[in-house]
Amino acid sequence: MTIAGAGIDDVRSRTFPFPTRHLLSAADLNIVQANDLLDLADAFVGVGRQASKKLDLLKGRTVINLFFEASTRTQSSFEIAGKRLAADVVNMSARSSSMTKGETLIDTAMTLNAMRPDLLVIRHSSSGAAALLSQKVGCSVINAGDGRHEHPTQALLDALSMRRAFGRVSGLTVAICGDVMHSRVARSNVALLGTLGANVRLVGPPTLIPSGADRWGAEVHHDLEKGLKGADVVMMLRLQLERMDGALAPSPREYFRFWGLDRTKLAVAAPGVRVMHPGPMNRGVEIDSDVADDPSLSLIQDQVEMASPCAWRCWPPWRRAWTTRHEPAVHRPDQRPAG
């Protein structure tokens, strides 16, 4: 058997029927489901490194990527994944949709639903948009980020990067640092990493840690040194100035002085610590280039590579769910996603 054939057979052997139609929240996954998805994604990594990357697992299926926010990594990852699995992939953005003419998200969903796609991948600036869309269409929906709410596929690729680096996720101490207030990545990671048995810390200034974060199942630290002490993984978050109402953070220079990650601050972490960032990075604001670009420390490029395999593994488990379309809920024009 060729290496390529072995990789494809490994993927096929790990494909399984997923118990739900949609992937809306990392909190919806139990430990068995999460590990099954990570195992499948791990198999896809090998296929993605082969010269021939095509599989016919989604041949004849139609996937629509519906992105209402700017995206490089996530949209490209889902597009590449769909094409490598032989799906027919359609990319839509807010600029190319009728929403620029006043059409609502629900009307857009109803229009797309009439075209009978098999899967919608959505990113939207409003929290709850993916869940609302899932109620209005007859196909499966994957949440690729909705407002400040969640980004479950990012959490899965982060967990895969950790597992490949350490051989496990359970028992790791993971410090998620920076602008937690506006981060859907932080929320999904707290949920998924907790399910997988990691010890999660949220680290940042009080103005950037939401009230009630201590009830998410993570430790909360407002002192960077204490938050990083003994951490196996340090995940830095982008300072999301575009989502902030008012001055919640100092100038970029002052922010880096107190909260930006450099080698000096990282010295209190555990031996063998690895550094992560969901991207895009603001160099010299939340992370120093010397740390971000050091292959002995950084998993950032690995995270980028894991994005496409993690998008791949989101789809084959849903094939059985696609065999029967579900009638969407009755359209209510006054219903809007929570903002």
Image (tube, rainbow, N blue to C red):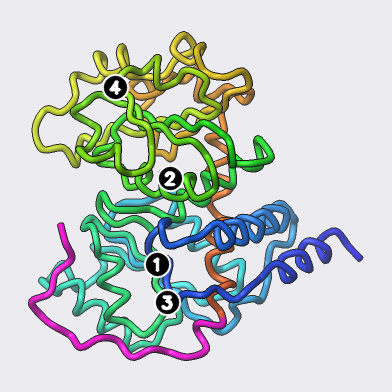
* Classed neighbour count for the residue bearing mark 3: other residues with Cα under 10 Å, few (<14), some (14–19), many (≥20): many
Q: Return the disc, 2 or 4, that comes first in the chain's sequence.
A: 2
* Location of mark 3 (residue): 140
Eyeballing the image, is 68 above or below 218?
A: below
Q: Return the disc, 4 or 1, that comes first in the chain's sequence.
A: 1
Residue 121: mark: 1
Q: Return the disc, 2 or 3, that comes first in the chain's sequence.
A: 3
Q: Is residue 285 magenta?
A: no
Q: Amino acid at mark 4?
A: His
Q: Which secondary structure class fits the magenta region best?
A: loop
- The residue at the point 15 percent across, 73 percent down is 104
Q: Quadrant of the C terminus?
A: bottom left
Range covered by the magenta-colored residues: 320-339
Q: Position of residue 158 (x, y in %)?
A: 52, 44
Q: Quadrant of residue 95?
A: bottom left
Residue 222: mark: 4
